[in-house]
Amino acid sequence: MRIPHKGFVVVADGRKMLFFRNEGDALYPNLELVRQREQDNPPDREHKSDAAGRASSPMGGVRSGFTEVDFHQLEEDRFASETADLLKKRALNNDFESLIIVAPPKTLGELRKHYHKEVESRLEGEIAKDLTGHPVSEIEKIISEA
């Protein structure tokens, strides 16, 4: 996948977001970090104070358990929604003309739920991979080979 000159690349997962601008050209990308955002999201067990409850019928006999909420996943989904909102603001400000998004499949799915039409119109491609922990040179290579 080619990254146009001045094209934006967003590399994100549920807790880290990296905004890059291609200062190179389509054949030889040179991604420069424009913005980085990271949130502290401890494991689900650290969000909870106790186990899920149980309920029983007043008539007796019927017992059921409540489903547990995964607070860690809720925070990751919220972070993806905030990332999509930031993309919307930047698109409406004409900060970029083309956009490539790289995110794990689950995060990518959550981002898609919140894409604004301006973001969708500038979206050149998506790559379903987690690259937030990779060096920039490797990110450039993986995107170029996609």
Image (cartoon, rainbow, N blue to C red):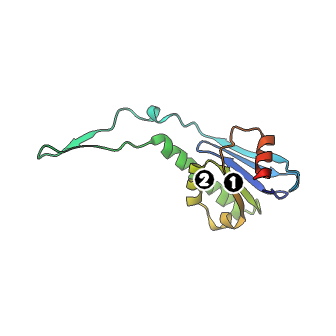
* Residue beneath the point at 76% across and 61% down: 98
Quarter occupied by residue 3: bottom right
Q: Which residue is mark 1?
A: 101
Q: Which mark is residue 108?
A: 2
Eyeballing the image, is 63 above or below 145? above
* Residue beneath the point at 76% across and 55% down: 8
Crowding at label 2, few (<14), some or many (≥20) Cα neighbours within 10 Å? many
Looking at this view, is 51 or 79 the one in front? 51
- Which corner quadrant holds the N terminus? bottom right
- Count of numbered tags: 2
Q: Secondary structure at mark 2?
A: helix
The reply to whether residue 74 is in sight is yes
Crowding at label 1, few (<14), some or many (≥20) Cα neighbours within 10 Å? many
Provide residue 56's location: percent of width, then percent of height: 19, 43
Residue 52 relative to residue 123: left or right: left
Residue 46 relative to residue 17: left or right: left
Name the amino acid, label 2: Leu
Name the amino acid, label 1: Ile
